[in-house]
Image (cartoon, grey):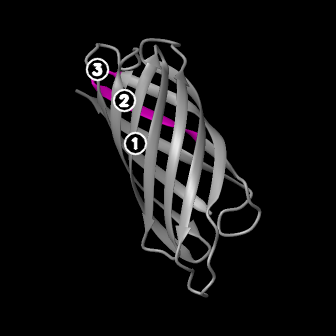
Amino acid sequence: MKKIFLGLLMVSSLMGDIFSQGSASIGVKLGGASIGNEDYTIAGLSGNYFVLDDFSVGLAYEKWFSGDPDIDKLSIESTYFIPASQKFHPYIGLLARHIFISGSDRFGRSFDDTNAYGYRAGLAFVQDNLLISAGVVQEKYDTSEGIFNDTQTYLEVVVGFTF
């Protein structure tokens, strides 16, 4: 499965530093993926809250459409931003996902829901009210059968604005 993912993140913070405890963000995700001969468009929403300085926890939802079967993903994630400098923040994070699979593919096969666990790592750049990050995500699925199996690795890019 090839997956290219672009996120547009709108960060809302009452404090000056978007990585400070108490800061929150709301995100909109747009992207695409291919599974076999099926091409999907992906849309999603996410929310994160900094429970400690430089450490956020969040929830995310993705809807995969324009392909068969129907796919929805619900994720719980945590990310630690390493305060390397004022502008650059390397990050590492963990995620857990439940993947809801409904309907059947074009051959009439149906699939069971599955779970995935993984990590992300990358670099975030902050300049005034702009945040840009790029990194890699790796997910391991708890099944070796179905449309999601084994391990998937893909790139993620996030562009965000603070307000």
Q: Tell me the tag on residue 46.
A: 1
Q: Is 113 located above or below residue 151 in the figure?
A: below
Query: Which residue occupies the foreground of this view, 69 or 161?
Result: 69
The region drawn magenta spans 127-136
Mark 3 highlights which residue? 128
Horizontal and vertical percent position of residue 61 = 44, 50
Say which residue appears at 59% left-offset and 61% top-offset.
2
Secondary structure that dominates the magenta span? strand
* Residue occupying the far right of the picture: 144
Quadrant of the image for the N terminus?
bottom right
The quarter of the displayed image where residue 36 is located: bottom right
Horizontal and vertical percent position of residue 23 = 35, 21
Q: Is 49 located above or below residue 29 in the figure?
A: above
Q: Is 94 located above or below residue 45 in the figure?
A: above
Q: Amino acid at mark 3?
A: Asp
Q: Amino acid at mark 2?
A: Leu
> Who comes first in sequence, dot 1 or dot 2?
1
- Crowding near the residue tagged with mark 1, few <14, some 14–19, many ≥20 C-alpha atoms within 10 Å: many
Quadrant of the image for the C terminus?
top left
